[in-house]
Image (cartoon, rainbow, N blue to C red):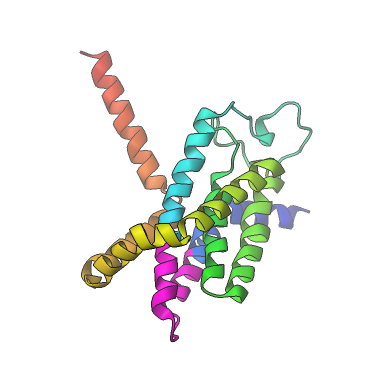
Amino acid sequence: MPVLDVVIVFITRSYLFKGGVMMTFLWWGWFRPGPDQERKRLALMSVLFAALVTLLAARLLALTLPHRVRPMQDAAVDMVLPIGMAPMLQGWSSFPSDHAALFGCLASGMFLVSRRAGWLASAYCFFIILLPRVYTGLHFPSDILVGYGLGTFMTWSVSRRRPMERCIRPAFAWFMARPQVWYPLFFLVSYEIATLFDDVRNLGTLVYRIIDWMLENN
């Protein structure tokens, strides 16, 4: 159905409907009042840390594991791209999905604040963010499942007692004593997570090309 194709392609390319909504869940949890607000904020700080580690781990796995061609670029896959969808991410391995890893981490992290919010965030992540990436040929289902599992595992690992007490709690105390540092940083990290660090990736690519050019011309 043409209308369905256009809507799904738009959502797939939209930062608002992906990272924007998921980070809104996180900010909601941060400012949600309650007698255990400090505990929940501590948990959410651990989720932020886990998200950064998860995205890095997903990219390292994609670079080091055997390359996997995306369905839209695989001649062995018999599919017709949705209307408005063009081949993209040429040369990027599809396994595991960094979208699934990152947003799976954030969605599972919401269970640390509210079970209802956790289920809502997980459902949104699965149906609005991840399924469209299979529909548009960006990922195989296994890319999504492994990425989501990686994100969930990272959230579970970082929220354990030992990492919380040794790393997250000291950082939390330091930042809470300096809100003028924490909230600008929280905003910046939220923005980058919402956009999957596209600006950082582009900057890294630019720096790599400049260094490569300088080495070739020396």
Instruction: Give the image location of residue 54, x and y in percent.
Output: 48, 48
Q: Nearer the viewer, residue 156 or 25?
A: 156
In the shown orientation, is residue 145 left or right of residue 17? right
Q: Residue 203: which quarter of the image? A: top left
In the shown orientation, is residue 110 left or right of residue 40? right
Residue 84 can be seen in this image: no
Q: Residue 213: which quarter of the image? A: top left
Instruction: Give the image location of residue 196, x and y in percent.
Output: 46, 50
User: Residue most toward the front?
Assistant: 162
Q: Residue at x 44, y 67 (%)?
A: 43
Report the predominant secondary structure element of the magenta stretch: helix
Q: Is residue 70 above or below residue 214?
A: below
Q: Nearer the viewer, residue 166 or 70?
A: 166
Instruction: Give the image location of residue 83, x and y in percent.
Output: 69, 46
Residue 163 counted in the magenta span: no
Q: Is residue 87 above or below residue 16?
A: above
Q: Is residue 28 above or below residue 33?
A: above
Magenta stretch? 23-46
Q: Residue at x 51, y 61 (%)?
A: 16
Q: Residue at x 68, y 60 (%)?
A: 127
